[in-house]
Image (tube, grey):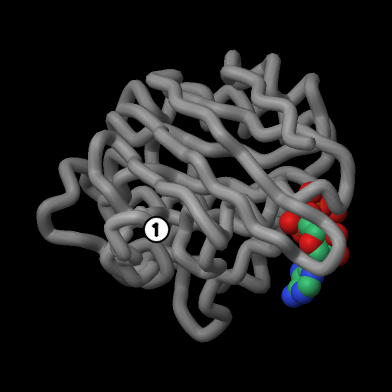
């Protein structure tokens, strides 16, 4: 489990940059609004092209401007969990989870649903879930796609504080059960501490 990220991008007047190499299981990118945290995640995901640099996740090269390497988002095999959960409204929870599941995934639906505390929700529709429940499903769907890493962009910003603590405890254990490292964007140092994350200040 490792991240090796060295990217720069000029966006309007702002220069967005991150240079960090680590073997930490969870890395928290922290910084004020507008500094470029989401842009950095998008550069790692392949949704935004850096002007220069490289991205390697667990030794796999995903982008390298010197070598003209730029894998498509699908080929990067990264799971992205957004602030707004983006579940498919026309699919029950079970089908949301199974969407994009890789047969090679070492995680079974049942084990993962149990770990995430959503086993009792598998037959529900997304619009019947609370914010915290829906976010657990979004995390499960990302994990079942057998990602190299999880990218999480302020995933708990609309979850109340008690549920937030529970979900943070669950997220903290994801690398243990899945061997999937996490790049986690937040502006809340308390969240990073609860995750026992390595903190990287952006900006
Ligand atoms: N499509 C775009 N075109 C030009 N500039 C953009 C675009 N999207 C974002 N920006 C600018 O890039 C900078 C970084 O934005 P970004 O969303 O990455 O910051 P952030 O740290 O994630 O902010 P927040 O915490 O508010 O989500 C901001 O100044 C923003 O205005």
Which residue in the structure is indicated by mark 1? 65
Looking at the rendering, the quadrant in which ligand 1 lies is: bottom right
Q: Residue at 74%, 38% (x, y): give it.
A: 186
Would you say residue 158 is visible in this rendering?
A: no
Q: Nearer the viewer, residue 30 or 175?
A: 30
Is the residue marked by circle 1 packed among few (<14), some (14-19), or many (20+) residues within 10 Å?
some
Q: Quadrant of the N terminus?
A: top left
Residue 175 place in picture, x, y as percent: 38, 27
Total marks shown come to 1
For residue 85, above or below residue 20:
below
Residue 74 place in picture, x, y as percent: 32, 69
Q: Nearer the viewer, residue 173 or 73?
A: 73
Element under label 1?
loop
Would you say residue 30 is visible in this rendering?
A: yes
Q: Residue at 45%, 26% (x, y): give it.
A: 21
Q: Nearer the viewer, residue 198 or 65?
A: 65
């Amino acid at each position: 489990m490792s991240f090796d990220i060295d990217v720069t991008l000029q966006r309007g007047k702002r220069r967005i940059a991150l240079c960090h190499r680590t073997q930490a299981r969870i890395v928290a990118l922290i910084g004020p609004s507008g500094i470029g945290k989401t842009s950095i995640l998008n550069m790692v995901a392949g949704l935004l092209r850096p002007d220069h640099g490289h991205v390697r996740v667990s030794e796999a090269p995903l982008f390298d401007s010197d070598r003209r390497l730029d894998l498509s988002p699908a080929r990067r095999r990264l799971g992205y969990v957004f602030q707004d959960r983006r579940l498919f409204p026309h699919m029950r929870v079970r089908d949301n989870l199974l969407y994009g599941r890789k047969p090679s995934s070492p995680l079974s639906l049942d084990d993962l649903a149990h770990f995430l505390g959503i086993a009792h929700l598998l037959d529900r529709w997304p619009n019947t879930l609370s914010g915290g429940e829906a976010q657990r499903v979004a995390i499960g769907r990302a994990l079942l796609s057998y990602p190299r890493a999880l990218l999480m962009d302020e995933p708990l910003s609309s979850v109340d504080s008690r549920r937030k603590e529970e979900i943070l405890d669950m997220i903290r254990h994801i690398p243990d059960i899945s061997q999937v490292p996490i790049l986690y964007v937040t502006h809340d140092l308390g969240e990073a501490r609860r995750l026992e994350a390595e903190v990287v200040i952006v900006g």
